[in-house]
Image (cartoon, helix red, strand yellow):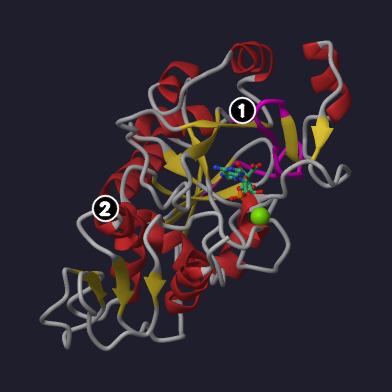
Amino acid sequence: MVDILPISDQAIEIAAKAIRRGDLVAFPTETVYGLGADATSDRAVARIFEAKGRPRFNPLIAHFATEESAREAVAFTDVADRLADRFWPGPLTLVLPRRTPCPLSLLVSAGLETAAVRVPSGPLAGTFLSAAGVPVAAPSANRSGRLSPTAAQHVANDLGDHVAVILDGGPCAIGLESTVVDLSGAQPTILRQGGLSQEELQRALGMRLRAADADDEAPRAPGMLTSHYAPLLPLRLNADAAGPNEALLGFGPDCPDATLNLSDAGDLVEAAANLFAYLHRLDTPDHAGIAVSPIPEQGLGRAINDRLRRGAVRE
Ligand code: TXA
Ligand code: MG
């Protein structure tokens, strides 16, 4: 059974070490418990999707100890400066363009050119994130489709087999996820209502905000779009071999001719970790298209196939 560790310097050190090793750690924030992994490691982030059993790759929030460290990963705008100064640490997530280079795994962004960042509050979150020394990707620490956890025991019941450590900081003060504001487009848009109210945000900015769920003109949350990461080149799925001028993105030991192999060993966690980075590497004018070997429709293979099918839709 997983260790539930009450707050202490030693518990935080154990949890920080687990993150740096690439393991999963559940930790409390002011909103809900997060299922955390080293956000700079594709492999560690892939394990989050495996543990949650999500059928698709939704982009995740990267958590930082300080605003300064968040600025190293994404490009702030004037509005971002104002909102971060006013509400961080706190229940607000900002979606901003990734910097180049960006320390965050592409899997955190699910292949998008933006990343969601936040500096959480709560008695433990900042100390844990400083000790970890890396940004921590964390969705709510529940299996897909279950309730968000607001106590350590909720996490143990739902995900106990998947996490190395659960840091117990008692019940979460807010109990509702952070508010997500997209600042990467022409107008700020609330993508998800949460612990910081729309009214408070509007007062701070002195303007009305669009909300994606209330306003049909506003962009939908990215997980819901048909293709929010499509390579420029055509994708051909379930391919046995590459056609003329095609690159072959292989999977498993039976692909000796693969241009790149998502996992020689046929390991779906490794394949998920490599997916977005390899698609980017193959998506160049050197090839006429990208053929992809069959990926088994099980475990993380379902999320990989979901993303590949969306990527194959030409709009
Ligand atoms: O309160 C919270 O935000 C909790 C705690 C653990 O911090 N975390 C959380 O993460 O709720 P998650 O992964 O369950 O929710 C992430 C939300 C989703 O609605 C996702 O679509 C959006 O943030 N999001 C993440 N990255 C995005 C991006 N690049 N563009 C647009 N939306 C993004
Ligand atoms: Mg959630």
Q: Is residue 65 left or right of residue 287?
A: right
The magenta-colored residue range is 167-188
Q: Going 79% across and 43% down the picture, which residue do you hit?
A: 212
Callout 1 amino acid: Ser
Q: Are marks 2 and 1 in contact (CB under 8 Å)?
A: no
Helix, strand or loop status at disc 1: loop
Vertical side of 107 occupied by 57: above or below? below
Q: Which residue is mark 1?
A: 121
Residue topped by disc 2: 284
Ligand 2 sits in quadrant = bottom right
State left or right for residue 8 relative to residue 245. right
The numbered mark at residue 47 is none
Task: Please report whichever mark, 2 or 1, sits nearer to the chain's N-terminal start.
Answer: 1
* 118 or 111: nearer the viewer: 111
Quarter of the image where one finds residue 135: top left
Vertical relation: 199 (above or below) 176:
above
Please report the residue visible at 26 percent of the width from the left and 70 percent of the height from the top: 262
How many tags in the picture? 2
